[in-house]
Amino acid sequence: MESSLLEKFDRLNEQTGYKNRSEAIRDLIREKLVNEEWRSSEQETVGVFSLIYDHHQRELNKTLTSIQHNHLDVIVSSTHIHIDRHNCLEVIILRGKADVIKKITNEIASTKGVKHGALNMTSTGSNL
Amino acid sequence: MESSLLEKFDRLNEQTGYKNRSEAIRDLIREKLVNEEWRSSEQETVGVFSLIYDHHQRELNKTLTSIQHNHLDVIVSSTHIHIDRHNCLEVIILRGKADVIKKITNEIASTKGVKHGALNMTSTGSNL
Amino acid sequence: MESSLLEKFDRLNEQTGYKNRSEAIRDLIREKLVNEEWRSSEQETVGVFSLIYDHHQRELNKTLTSIQHNHLDVIVSSTHIHIDRHNCLEVIILRGKADVIKKITNEIASTKGVKHGALNMTSTGSNL
Amino acid sequence: MESSLLEKFDRLNEQTGYKNRSEAIRDLIREKLVNEEWRSSEQETVGVFSLIYDHHQRELNKTLTSIQHNHLDVIVSSTHIHIDRHNCLEVIILRGKADVIKKITNEIASTKGVKHGALNMTSTGSNL
């Protein structure tokens, strides 16, 4: 590989914290594989969904709980953080096929009162 | 607004689960504001960082714990899920300025043994 | 809509150059519709593919021309810019189904000597 | 490197068209370096901006031409494609600092009548 390319890569890795070039390359490869996992319609994967909502919104808590209970086979856990007097952060971990995870998290994000929903597409790690 | 544009938007919202056009528009606006929050160097924001690692990797657990303890003012909570015999998922919630959150999560992601790290950029909700 | 949300949206639009709130909302909606266009396997869409390569790389020019000629039904035009003594930028406009455009541009990007390939997913505009 | 990781990477590369593993790795590294180029406030870079607009929109053509003429030092070329009776695609190549390119393309995208604007962040190639 061209030494000038590697030099620039090493410099960048130093900034982001890598101690070791091959670990940085491995991470680039794994990133690609995780993208593939999410494009696949067969593989099992893991999603971490974060939502911000106002807990004063009537009925919202009930709706969110009910959506989660309808998908117990996919929803692994749920963590709740009180951000301030109005806002709650809920982090839901899901495990299943990419399409199923996206459908459930879309349903939650589009519920009235949910201010922000963001899906983190990660992995079971078994392919990495 | 052109009715043909609204018609297509309504059709799309129906698919993603929105019951109501103005909630869908509000969510598009909030998405933009969250992006801004992450571009700002002043505002406080919230990040949810997911990492996959092999718990057999020597020393890794200790390193991860030590990084987190060095940033107690930013790290709010940490949830651990046992994915399989090898792989762990850890979900760390951070609250602080965008740059600080990125620096800490880069440090974790670049640690040897961490297979995948993904940062979900969400918000405190107080601007939404 | 909540006035505090609109206020923040207006302030953001002023920074990015919008003169008019409803044009900004229309653009958010169109952005969503273009994303959909690229997820669809049926709709015709438009891609703009940019590649950077070193024209000293043997055989590369021939390969790039041959790939383009194999897809004359999809490739609309090609613009060439001489960046410096080594580097060329070529911008290829493609029109067809999302999957076909992605396949061709992946083929080009993975050719040895192509340093960077980036696909801009835009639209025919007929749905917007 | 773990052979199981490389095996999966090779399989993925075959699908996207890579003939050669080290070219695929080089491209991952270059992708990272281009991202850095766009985060930098100093380096010169190249952007390819695509916009879709309805040429029946009064005054739009004049406005677009005037914006471009105000930035002759950054705008390298402009290609125009007639998509259908209403819609035009214009592809503008810009060369300069990331911030300047973003500012100009934001200005164009927010002009009334522009239906979609998308910025492709590529590179001069001199760092790759």
Image (tube, coloured by chain):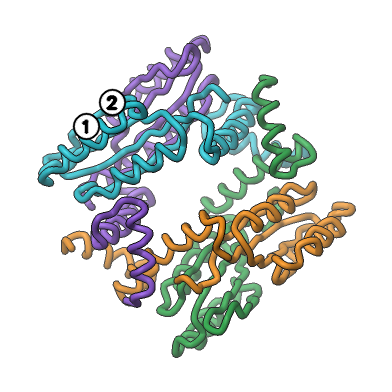
Chain colours: A purple, B cyan, C green, D orange
- Where residue C38 appears, as percent x and y from the top left, is 55, 53
Can residue A72 be seen by looking at this rendering? no
Q: Identify the residue at image location x=38%, y=59%.
A: A12
* Occupied quadrant, residue C3: top right
- For the N terminus of chain D, the image quarter is bottom left
Query: In this rendering, is residue B48 above or below A11?
Result: above
Q: Identify the residue at image location x=76%, y=58%.
A: D87
Type of residue at label 2? Ser
Which residue does the numbered mark 1 point to in the structure image?
A: B81
Q: Secondary structure at mark 2?
A: strand
Query: In this rendering, is residue D16 above or below D99?
Result: below
* Occupied quadrant, residue A75: top left
Q: Chain of mark 1?
A: B
* Occupied quadrant, residue D33: bottom left
Q: CA distance from mark 1 to mark 2?
A: 8 Å
Q: Chain of mark 2?
A: A
Is residue A112 shown left or right of residue B75?
right
* Callout 1–callout 2 Cβ contact below 8 Å: yes
Is residue B81 shown left or right of residue A48?
left
Which residue does the numbered mark 2 point to in the structure image?
A: A77
For label 1, count other residues whose C-alpha is less than 10 Å away and answer few (under 14), some (14-19) or many (20+): some
Can residue A34 be seen by looking at this rendering? yes
Type of residue at label 1? Ile
Q: Identify the residue at image location x=72%, y=62%.
A: D89
Query: In this rendering, is residue A6 above or below A28?
Result: below
- For the C terminus of chain D, the image quarter is bottom left
